[in-house]
Amino acid sequence: MDHILVAKNVTKTYGDYTALSNISLQIPKNCIYGLLGPNGAGKTSFIRIINQITHQDSGEIFLNGEPLAPKHIASIGYLPEERGLYKSMKVGEQALYLAQLKGLSKSEAKTRLKYWFDRLDIGDWWDKKIQELSKGMAQKVQFIVTVLHEPKLLIFDEPFSGFDPINANIIKDEILQLKENGTSIIFSTHRMESVEELCEYIALIHKSEKILDGKLSDIKKAYKNNIFNVGLHVDRDAEALMNALKDKFNILSSEIDAEDNQLNFRVQLPTHKTGDILMELSKGANINRFEETIPSANDIFIQTVNKKDNGK
Amino acid sequence: MASKLGLIIKREYLAKVRNRSFIVMTILSPLLLVGMTVLIAYLAKVNDNEARVITVLDDSAFFYQTLKPSKNISYVHFEDLTLEQAKDSTTALEYYGLLYIPNGETVEKVANESYLFTKENPNTAVTQELEGVFQKQLRQDRLQKLGVTSDQFSSVEEPFEINLSTFSGEKSMKGINEIKAIIGGGFGYAIMMFIIIYGGFVMRSVIEEKTSRIIEVIISSVKPFQLMLGKIIGNSLAGITQFSIWIVSASALLLVAVMIFGIDLSALSADGQVQAGPMTGVSQFGAMDGKMMMYAKEVYDIPWGLLIVSFFIYFVLGYLIYSSIYAAIGAAVDNETDTQQFIFPIILPLMLAIYVGFFSVFSNPHGPIAVGFSLFPLTSPIVMLMRLPGGIGEGGVPLWQFLLSVFLLIITFFGIVSLAAKIYRTGILMYGKKPTYKELIKWLRY
């Protein structure tokens, strides 16, 4: 597979403190890659190395197959977690300045800014100062500035912080659209809800080490443990049926709703075989729900981090 | 690369010169300066005009000719009054005082019995002047008793000044060293003020980028060093703009003030105050008698070309060294209140340079202390400039000292700027920590 970014054994220390230890990652092209981990895990240190704000002590990084070099700055867009704009500078002037620093010509930057300002419906802000805007409004400007130079690789560090739900949604759609247009995106966060929706690949960094990476769907498969949620409509004595099932299967929990003649339970099957239990159930009840529980990214995150911490 | 630096410089410059308080300061400062000067000159003039009126009740014949009105005192002579009447009249007329000179046979006796009556303790200038009048009269009187005529006496009173010369035969003059040091000191002082004011600008600009959290956005596009350099250059260009406006507008205003109020600025310099600018120079040397001509020639002979070129060298290097330290401090802290502990050590060598300059260089421009401080890189931009009006070479600063001082300054420049850049690079990404010196030293090794 083609990779936009490959990191090989990247290590970074600050004095006695190890920020990254031997991190290797492969980030495929044209996908959204989630860089996950608790606060202080080393995500930002890694991102700063990609942006050449700091340099790794050892290890190599390749962008598009080439060793990372200063010229690549123009092909990366970065929205840092600690972000802001010059408060007393006008929106348009500021956006032009930042775009020119990324290597765009003034006229090109103007054209593109006009497009984006219209697209995000902020066209009449051009002559306003940042300090006159609300935080959410300023974030929109910040987003535009990040993507304006059409980088091949976009890095978002906690992009949704500071947005209200409506604007967060607009930005999410824009990110998905950018991906559709062929941009590769690194998405760093410790908030898992957004990961499920956006990321195809993830890497989990904890205490400066990578503890898990791969395709999200594969990881989820690997973390499945054959637990099923079952719902039955029973005409007869529900309790007797429950007891009968408990003898044969590993029932984790159950509840009986007598009024609606409904029996719900969670069962863990020994292997990935559903035939036995389905056969058994079909004898005396109507199945209205039978679904495998798939662990959420959050579950995987917590589980892996705990396992790692307890294992030590 | 270069164009990015240009962009940064342009932004920093515009951000500064559009700043409201900057504009206000630029306009207001010359007005304040000229206003103060006019006020001082005006007050001095008023003071001069306010000669104190002293009434004189002179029953003798010895002093009538000698009491001539002066800058401080004018006299009103009473006749045919008793002492009590004279006292009452003086009080009624609200004059400053009454000088009573009784009748007597000898000057000696009359002088000893004379009194000055005043409402309060009399002004020293007044008593001194009166005492001078009496003393002169007494001396003349005593000499006359020894057979000296008054013509002889006048010729004896001719003042005298010693002739001065250097070994190479040029005529030298009293006070020329001071004049030279003051001119050099003016340059040095300008450098210090510039560093303190505009170094502070750089520092605040760095802090602003940190607190507004834009710093990481910027340095994902440019190198921290470029940003730091752009900031320093941009802010100093803004500073130079402000300085130029100040000089031009202050001179223009001063000229206008002089024409409107007709204030004689030489009155100020006569009082020993030193004025900047060519204006006073002109009026100071307006009376071109022989001596003044020589002073003018000396000032003219100061190696202005050398002075201006070296001012430029010392200014650029000194300012870059100090402002990069300011930038590093700005990067190390989160807000301006935390800067105090770091600022003091910067200002210290600057203050030291000024003090050493005024106390040591004035009296002995080529003594060991002056030489030492004009070589030490953190003080040399100021101290060396104070020595340089004497020229380079014979009678001035030895060439090797000048070269060594510039050389040391350049070495220090590279050293300090690279250290400052390291602290800057690490500091701008640190939030919420109040740094210690120990911490800063750690950053140097990252």
Image: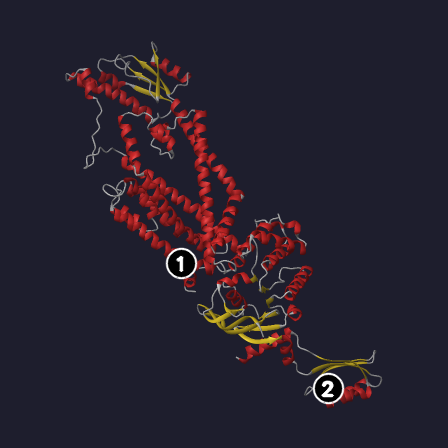
**What's the residue type where badge 1 is placed?**
Leu
Residue A24 spot, x, y in % from top left: 52, 74
Q: Is residue A224 above or below residue A112?
A: below
Q: Is residue B326 left or right of residue B170?
A: right
Name the foreground residue: A30 vs B45.
A30
* Subunit under mark 2: A
- Residue at screen point 84% across, 86% down: A236
Residue pushed farthest top? B80
**What's the residue type where badge 2 is placed?**
Thr
Instruction: Report the disc number at residue A274.
Output: 2
Whether residue A86 appears in this view of the structure is no
Residue B56 spot, x, y in % from top left: 33, 15
Quarter of the rendering containing residue B104: top left
Report which residue position mark 1 lands on.
B419
Quarter of the rendering containing residue B391: top left
Q: Quadrant of the C terminus of chain B?
A: bottom left
- Residue at screen point 36% across, 22% down: B118
In the rendered structure, are the residues bearing label 1 and label 2 in contact, judged by CB atoms less than 8 Å apart? no
**Mark 1: few/some/many CA within 10 Å (<14, 14-19, 20+):** some
Name the foreground residue: B201 vs B268.
B201
